[in-house]
Image (spheres, rainbow, N blue to C red):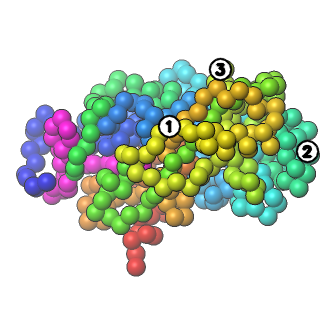
């Protein structure tokens, strides 16, 4: 792209352009618009869509955080902002079920969850396998399993959330273009230019929240993320009363058979269940196989039948999505050192959606001020780029 001088009086010039309007991008567009910024959000597909990482009815939110106690402060802020979003919309977007992190006592999930609870004084219970099964009869875990139950965990309604952010953003004056593909972008002086398959735009600031397309949008950087194909399925429980949200917490379970996660039944959608890092398939998001094979279904069903037999009825539906993994499974958030008017968030590694509410605030801060009050030190870009 040839650099040209930017005319800030052009009607196609914005205060901020956001590339990618999934969970993170929609929250960012909304926050910027509500701050009075002239903002454009661009997504190559419908909003929401089933091509990236943010789609679907539900996502887990949990206060106990086995990936690192450093996340707890950030997730607390996210909870506060989710409740504020509910107040704005009058919708239920977060439902508390409690969360369970389970595995062998010395496993990463159990030890990490326990550490985060202790470090941040989170109320929790440590339960044996038999105690878990008695407390939550939908679970069938071996006695040697240990679980950390934390009552604040729950479910976010993902598609409803993205639609809510887009609706609020438009009401605040944002312009959002769906089904428009960004072909290239360039920093120009202290501003930025974006070219799509439908035209060209300029902005004082550029935010990139491109999900699995992070590396393609940031191709001038070393490759730091690996998109991975993921499969989830929904089952019609044999005993549906055991999978009611009132007594079936969201869970993560790590055992020799795999790392599993799941949700109670909402609105007849079925018992949602998945095996994290399903088949460890690194993919190109533009060419990924989005069909769910019989083998995919077999892998998921094996986990359900072993640990949740009363949930292993008819498979009602199945779907693919994408994790965008970093090597350490921590996020990548910041501004480009050589072009600080460009900020980015990516590499959410399959556990990012719960942070969308606070990420909107973080990314708006970076676009507006170049820094944020939130602690994002863990997510520094230079942990990958320093020699």
Q: Main secondary structure of the magenta part?
A: strand
Residue positioned 12% across, 43% down in the render: 8
Q: Which residues are magenta?
A: 186-212
Q: Nearer the viewer, residue 226 or 173?
A: 226
Tell me if 93 is positioned left or right of 310 in this view: left
Q: Residue furthest front?
A: 294
The residue that mark 3 highlights is 267
**Residue 178 x, y percent position in the rendering:** 31, 31
Q: Earlier in the sequence, mark 1 or mark 2?
A: 2
**Within 10 angstroms of label 3, few (less than 14), some, or many (20 or more) residues?**
few
**Residue 148 x, y percent position in the rendering:** 79, 50
**Within 10 angstroms of label 1, few (less than 14), some, or many (20 or more) residues?**
few
Residue 79, by quadrant, is top right
The residue that mark 2 highlights is 131
Tell me if 3 is positioned left or right of 94 in this view: left
Tell me if 37 is positioned left or right of 91 in this view: left
Q: Is residue 162 visible?
A: yes
Quadrant location of the N terminus? bottom left
Instruction: Give the Cα distance between marks 1 and 2.
Output: 39 Å
The residue that mark 1 highlights is 291
Quadrant location of the C terminus? bottom left
**Within 10 angstroms of label 2, few (less than 14), some, or many (20 or more) residues?**
some
> Vertically, is 271 above or below 357?
above
> Vertically, is 33 above or below 337?
above
Q: Nearer the viewer, residue 358 or 188?
A: 188
Looking at the rendered structure, the secondary structure element under dot 3 is loop
Looking at the rendered structure, the secondary structure element under dot 1 is loop
**Residue 188 x, y percent position in the rendering:** 15, 55
On whether residue 209 falls in the magenta region, the answer is yes
């Amino acid at each position: 792209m040839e650099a040209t001088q930017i005319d800030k009086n052009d009607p196609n010039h914005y205060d901020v352009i956001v590339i990618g309007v999934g969970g993170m991008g929609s929250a960012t567009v909304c926050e910027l618009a509500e701050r009075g910024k002239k903002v454009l959000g661009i997504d190559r597909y419908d909003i929401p869509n089933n091509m990236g990482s943010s789609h679907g009815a539900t996502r887990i939110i949990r206060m106990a955080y086995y990936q690192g106690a450093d996340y707890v402060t950030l997730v607390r802020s996210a909870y506060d902002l989710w409740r504020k979003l509910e107040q704005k919309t009058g919708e239920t977007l977060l439902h508390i079920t409690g969360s369970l992190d389970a595995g062998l006592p010395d496993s990463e999930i159990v030890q990490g969850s326990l550490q985060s609870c202790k470090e941040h004084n989170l109320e929790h219970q440590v339960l044996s396998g038999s105690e878990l099964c008695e407390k939550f009869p939908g679970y069938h875990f071996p006695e040697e399993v240990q679980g950390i139950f934390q009552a604040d965990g729950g479910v976010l309604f993902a598609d409803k959330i993205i639609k809510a952010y887009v609706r609020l953003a438009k009401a605040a004056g944002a312009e959002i273009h769906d089904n428009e593909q960004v072909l290239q972008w360039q920093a120009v002086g202290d501003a930025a230019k974006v070219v799509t398959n439908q035209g060209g735009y300029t902005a004082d600031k550029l935010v990139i929240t491109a999900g699995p397309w992070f590396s393609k949008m940031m191709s001038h950087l070393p490759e730091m993320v690996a998109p991975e194909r993921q499969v989830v399925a929904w089952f019609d429980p044999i005993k549906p009363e055991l999978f009611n949200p009132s007594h079936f917490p969201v869970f993560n379970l790590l055992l020799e058979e795999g790392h599993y996660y799941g949700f109670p039944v909402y609105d007849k959608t079925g018992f949602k269940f998945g095996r994290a890092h399903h088949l460890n398939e690194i993919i190109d998001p533009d060419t990924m196989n989005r069909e769910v094979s019989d083998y995919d279904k077999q892998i998921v069903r094996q986990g359900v039948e072993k640990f949740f037999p009363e949930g292993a009825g008819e498979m009602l539906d199945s779907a693919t999505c994408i994790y965008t993994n970093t090597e350490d499974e921590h996020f990548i958030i910041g501004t480009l050192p050589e072009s600080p008017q460009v900020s980015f968030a990516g590499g959410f590694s399959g556990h990012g959606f719960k942070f969308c509410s606070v990420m909107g605030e973080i990314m708006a801060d970076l676009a507006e001020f170049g820094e944020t009050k939130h602690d994002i030190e863990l997510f520094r870009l230079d942990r990958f780029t320093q020699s």
